[in-house]
Image (tube, rainbow, N blue to C red):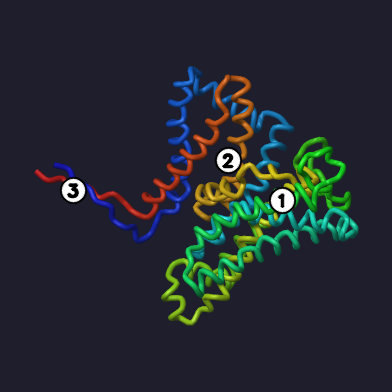
Amino acid sequence: MINFRLEEREKTPYWLIFVSPIIAIFFSLFIASFLIILAGVNPIESFVQLAIGAFGSKNAMAETLARATPLILTGLAAAIAFRAKFWNIGAEGQLYFGALATTLLGTGLVVLPSFLMIPFLFVTGALAGGLLLLPLVILKLFYKVDEVVTTLLLNFVVVLLVSYLLEGPLKDPMSLGWPQGKSVIDSGILPQIVPRTRLHFGFIVAIFSAVAIWVVLNKTIIGYQIKSVGYNVSASAHAGLPIVRTIVIVALMSGGMAGMAGVTETAGLKGYLTLDLSPGFGYAGIAVAMLANLNPLGIIFSGVFLASIYVGADAMSRAMNVPTYLADVIVALNVLCILLSLIFLNFKIKFNVKK
């Protein structure tokens, strides 16, 4: 008789940390191939079309990287918060709040040269997203209110607020009745990286943000405080660490990243605020963070990976007549497989053979 049990690892091998997510991704694609077969299509040809649609040309690569920009930023928002065991599920609302700040300040209220206007919009967008989280931090720290509930519900409040404003005070009179905000002034529009594509300067900002967050978390005192609070808040408090200040900083950083994602979509991709600005980037950012195991540098690659699935799925659907919702299924399978792989990173299987 063969029995097995899970035994916690004292130290996880570096090669396993690298290989584990790759195996999980390929295993999820293997499972997804059965769904594609059920649709009556060759899965290998479908995945080839998906890859071509995401990376097969200059325009395809530019579109993938443009789609990855908000995913990287919302992924960073989730990773920072989750590191400190602050479960911020409200990146969607914070994204819209950052976009709202861009609309309020970047459509003519403040006029600056481009080299000042663009940083100004990013700073104000980050502040808007971060400050939106502060009341929820107070509720969590002093009144023990579950942040999962409050951040999730605040998403709906912010989206409804934006809907009201776009139908009323902020509605562009030149929009021919469509609910959209006024256009961002020319000096606030993010420049294109590749001409005649949708890839804009926001992608560089996202990459820089990921590197900066990695440095903060791994090379600074506040980064070690964030990790310590995440590991054990009681022990951290007993050791004299400033718990309240640390969680407040986490909230400002997390909400700030999501708010910057709203800036990139408003000032970089569309040029104005609409209610369909985000097709769920805030929620997809959680998947991006989990795929990268909360590593800021890994989030760059997981964000591009998820973006390639979304962009490539459109091409796959047109070429192979496969439903586009399979992209969501593939993403969900990836997240599930990554979560399962985390078990093997933290535990090893011990087999016992009994006669």
Percent of width and height locating residue 4 = 22, 47
Mark 1 or mark 2, which has the lower sequence index? 1
Q: Is 135 on the left or on the right of 111, as rendered?
A: left
Nearest the eye: 277 or 46: 277
Q: Does 132 sit left or right of 244 as displayed?
A: right
Query: Residue 186, position in %: x, y?
Result: 88, 49
Which of the two discs, 1 and 3, labels the residue nearer the N terminus? 1
Out of 188 and 31, give the one closest to the viewer: 188
The kind of residue tagged 1 is Tyr
Percent of width and height locating residue 254 = 61, 61
Q: Nearer the viewer, mark 1 or mark 2?
A: 1
- Which residue is nearer to you in this view: 236 or 217? 236
Residue 164 badge? 1
CB within 8 Å, label 1 to label 2: no
Depicted 284 relative to depicted 36: above or below: below
* Amino acid bearing label 3: Asn
The residue that disc 3 covers is 352
Identify the residue at image location x=55%, y=33%: 327
10 Å crowding of disc 1: few (<14), some (14-19), many (20+): some
**Residue ID at (37%, 55%):** 346
Q: Quadrant of the C terminus?
A: top left
Calculate the distance from the C-alpha at mark 1 to the C-alpha at mark 2. 32 Å
Find numbered disc 1 in the image and state the secondary structure of the residue it sits on.
Answer: helix
Q: CA distance from mark 2 to mark 3?
A: 40 Å
